[in-house]
Amino acid sequence: MARAIRRYYYGSKRLSLRAAYEMMMLEDYVGHNGEFDSDAPTWSQFRHYYYDKGYHKNPQKVIAREGLTKYQRDHRPAWGSSAGWRPQPGSYQMDATQADIYLVSRKDRSIVVGRPYIYMAVDTATHLIAGVYVGFDCDETAVMACIAQATMDKVEYCARYGIEITPEQWPSVGMPTEIITDQGREFLGPRMSELCRRYGLEVLTLPPFRPDQKGCVEKSIDLLQQRYKPLLRGKGVIEDDAQERWATDYRTQAVLDLDDFTRIVIHSVLYLNSGRLVDGKTPAKRWLEISPRLMTVDMEELHIQTLPRDTAKLTRKGIRVNRMWYGPDDATGLIIGDSYTIAYNPADLRRIHIILADGICPCHAVEIGQPLSVCEVDAAHEAAKKSRGVARAKETASSIAATQAIRAIIEHADEHKEPIRQVDGNTIKHDQITERGRLT
């Protein structure tokens, strides 16, 4: 029976326990005449043996049937607690998730631009949400933006969205000394390495499939979504039946744009930081009671450092980036026809920066005045492409109608054609005068 359990039940084919019993009977207890041997165990005996020997508790069961990845992620024992892993504030756990909500474009609210991503940086010692990023990027750019937001003054950040707070409600200001995260590619890219070298930031990468080792940020993301999802049902929030037959198309319910959703996330973060109690105190109060280990940095330098890079050529019309034209604020030292490295914010394309050897040259967009992200610009471009396609179809139909009318006129003239008599210049002038008289 032990051999049958290990051979048939502990296998990638995932046979049921009853199927494993039947395979054992077929292999060991069925004679040539097709009858069972007298000493064949019953199904009850086989099942009793399975539970009595503890095979149902053996980790090898999950590893063999579901794989090592499934075991490490969902069944591996987790000991201790992440609280108090670091004694001082300044060591942030980072992770990301795709929000369960569809958003519309800030430029045209009839265009659905998809689901945003939320990146969070949570302090290990106090459980304070130190930084958050809400946008459509899910790469190194989003990680850098989250770190920059965690470093900046939160009063100024909230004021951008019309939210007034006090420094005590969100007290984390400064560059962390350590980032704890998983082995996601966006946390291990070249720009992240450059940031670490520039500011002495350390990145601690955890083993794969061990979310329990960064439980602070995992739980914070869960609490954040539990906070806003019940209030936004029917406004684009995705429910559990999203993939089922006859389920509602939640994209048609979208009403919030990126700025609206960011304000909702900020209010949720403020509650989790200065309203929620953790061991009798709010995370913000615990932060203020302990001296944090943070670095003071130049925010303008950090902002440029965290922006994604691209290469573009300067022409007489300006610089073409992300399907938009930009004009330099000061063209001194720039040469038309040369290519330059530019830095831009994917969430706000109103301005870009030309990276020069001796400084930075800001450029302004010549086509837009409101904040637009790359995703929104792409969506508007696709909508305009469809409109142009409809207009071209109308143009073609109009051209064909004109051609048909012209051909009908020609055919009518051919039907009434008569032989042309011999003419000269004087005759043509005389006939023209006569024709004018008929027209009047």
Image: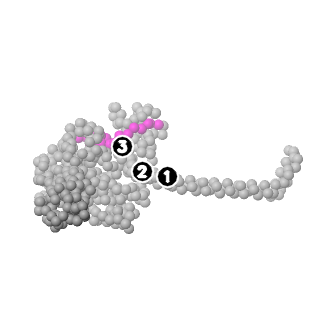
Badge 1, how many Cα within 10 Å: few under 14, some, many 20+?
A: few
- Segment tinted magenta in the rendering: 296-315
Q: Which residue is mark 2?
A: 377
Say if residue 176 shows up in the picture: no
Badge 3, how many Cα within 10 Å: few under 14, some, many 20+?
A: many
Q: CA distance from mark 1 to mark 2?
A: 12 Å
Asked if marks 2 and 3 touch (Cβ < 8 Å), the reply is no
Where's residue 404, x and y in %? 68, 56
**Secondary structure beneath label 1:** helix
Name the N-terminal-most of marks 3 and 1: 3
Q: Which residue is mark 3?
A: 344
Q: Which mark is residue 385?
A: 1
Residue at x-position 33% and y-position 32%: 358
Asked if marks 1 and 2 touch (Cβ < 8 Å), the reply is no
**Secondary structure beneath label 3:** strand
Examine the structure image and report whether residue 309 is included in the region drawn in magenta.
yes
Q: At label 3, which amino acid type do we have?
A: Tyr
Where's residue 350, x and y in %? 39, 47
Residue at x-position 19% and y-position 57%: 4
